[in-house]
Image (cartoon, rainbow, N blue to C red):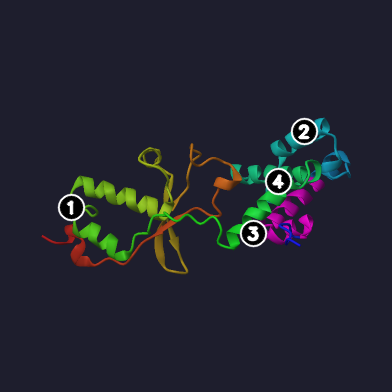
Amino acid sequence: MAESRFSAIDPSEFICQNENKNTARKTLTHLKLMGQFLSERHNEGRSIDKIPPTELDKYLSEFVVNIRTPKNEEYEPSTVRGMISSFDRHLRRHRYGSQRESLKAKKSHLKSLGKGAKPMKADPLTDQDIDKLYECNHLGKSTPTSLMNTLWFLNTLHFGIRGGSEEHRRICWGDVKLQHDPEKNLDYLEYHERITKTRTDDEQDSRIAPPRMYATPIVLKDVPFLHG
C-alpha cells in the first residue's frame, strides 16, 4: 500500500504552534482595550466578532477617534494602525475560516525548516570592504562626492533608509535629533522617519524603536581643523 501524502495534523493546533507569540499577545491586549471601550461607552458586552458589521463599523470609528494613551496623549499613527490590524486578525479568524491562518502558519513553519531560502542573496559588506572604500576615497571627506556617498552609506546602514536617492532627499530638519545615552556615555543621532511610499503607517512597516547612529571615539590627528 502506497504511503499517504497527507499528514494528520490538527489545523488549530498547528496555527497555535506557529503563531508569533508577540503578535498573539498584542492582539489580546488590543481586544481587551476595545472591550473596555465598548463596556464604558456603550455598555456593550459582546465581543467584536459577535457584533453586526454595520454596528461594529460605528464602534471602531469612534474608538479610533477617541483612543488615548494612559497619560491621555495621542498614540503614534502606527500604534493605532496596529490596533486595527489586531481587530482585523481576530475577525478574519472567526468569520472567514482558518485557511488564511493555516497558510500563514505553514509559511512560518517551512521557513523555520530552511525552506524558501534565496540562493542568490547579496553578500554583506565586511569591515575590510568598508575600509577599502575609504582608502579609495569613495567614502570619506576628500571630495564633495565622497562626503555625500558617506552620508548616504551611513544613513542606509544605521537608519535603514530604503531605495535610491528619493528617500534620502526627503529627510527634513528635525527628522534626525542629537541625543545622549547616559548608560553608554555616548552621543547618538536618532532618526524619526516620515510616512513615505516605502515606509507607511502600516504595522508591517513600522519599527519597534527609532533607529540610532552612535558616535565613535575620534582620533585627534584625523580632525583637519585642529591642525595648521
Q: Which residue is mark 4?
A: 100
Above or below 65: residue 109: below
Circle 2 — which element?
helix
119 with respect to 138 (left or right): right
Q: Which mark is residue 142?
A: 1
Q: Nearer the viewer, mark 1 or mark 3?
A: 3
* Magenta-colored span: 8-36
Q: Earlier in the sequence, mark 3 or mark 4?
A: 4
Q: Which residue is mark 2?
A: 57
Q: Which residue is mark 3?
A: 109
Q: Earlier in the sequence, mark 2 or mark 4?
A: 2
Q: Nearer the viewer, mark 4 or mark 1?
A: 4
Q: Residues within 10 Å of mark 2 (few under 14, many from 20)?
A: few
Pointer 2 and pointer 4: residues touching (CB < 8 Å)?
A: no
At 40% from the left and 65% from the top, the residue drawn is 186
Q: Position of residue 39 (x, y in %)?
A: 85, 44
Quadrant including the C terminus? bottom left
Above or below 191: residue 115: below
Instruction: Identify residue type, mark 1.
Output: Ser
Distance CA(mark 2)–CA(mark 3): 34 Å
At 23% from the left and 61% from the top, the residue drawn is 132
Circle 1 — which element?
loop
Q: Nearer the viewer, mark 2 or mark 4?
A: 4
Instruction: Identify residue type, mark 4.
Output: Arg
Distance CA(mark 1)–CA(mark 3): 50 Å
Quarter occupied by residue 168: top left
